[in-house]
Image (cartoon, rainbow, N blue to C red):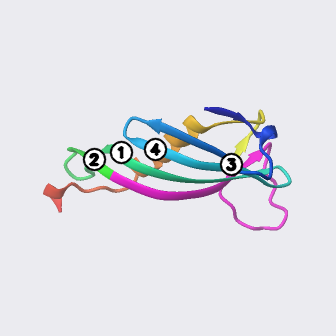
């Protein structure tokens, strides 16, 4: 799902994406300057591997996400740390964001029941 950042206003724009066994649901809302707030919930099952034995395991995921999307290069004038994703074509691909979040979860250290 590709969304034009220039169409996002102060009224939250809801979205919901399903990919295999996981749901990415939330809203986008204009925040300030060139920043768009994304608040969402990621829930479902992610298939990954045990970090010890390599067996496939299903992880139950239930995470709240909050970060900003910058329409263009993000410049931090106030030295405030934000989680910011930069977009250089005034578009955001929510499917790409979902896949990135899934890969981030998979990259963590996970142990299966047999290895515990």
Disc nearer the start of the sequence (3/1): 3
Name the residue that disc number 4 marks: 23
Most foreground residue, 102 or 50: 102
The residue under the point 75% across, 67% down is: 80
Tell me, yes or no, whether the two marked residues, 3 and 1, touch with CB atoms within 8 Å.
no
Q: Find residue 21 and report its horizontal and vertical position in percent.
A: 37, 40
In the image, the segment drawn in magenta is: 60-85
Name the residue that disc number 3 marks: 28
Name the residue that disc number 1 marks: 46
Provide the secondary structure element on which disc 2 rests. Answer: strand
* Tag shown at residue 58: 2
**For residue 90: magenta?**
no
The residue under the point 83% across, 67% down is: 78
Asked whether, in this view, residue 24 is left or right of residue 36, the answer is: left
Disc 4 from disc 1: Cα separation: 10 Å
Most foreground residue, 35 or 51: 35
**For residue 75: magenta?**
yes
Q: Residue furthest left?
A: 114
Disc nearer the start of the sequence (3/4): 4
């Amino acid at each position: 799902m590709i969304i034009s950042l220039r169409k996002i206003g102060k009224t939250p724009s809801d979205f919901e994406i399903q990919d295999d066994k996981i749901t990415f649901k939330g809203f986008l809302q204009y925040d300030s300057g060139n920043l768009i707030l994304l608040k969402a919930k990621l829930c479902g099952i992610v298939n990954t591997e045990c970090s010890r034995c390599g067996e496939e395991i299903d992880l139950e995921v239930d995470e709240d996400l909050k970060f900003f999307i910058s329409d263009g290069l993000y410049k931090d004038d106030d030295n405030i740390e934000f989680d910011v994703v930069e977009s250089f074509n005034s578009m955001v691909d929510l499917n790409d964001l979902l896949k990135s979040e899934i890969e981030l979860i998979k990259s963590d250290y996970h142990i299966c029941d047999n290895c515990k």
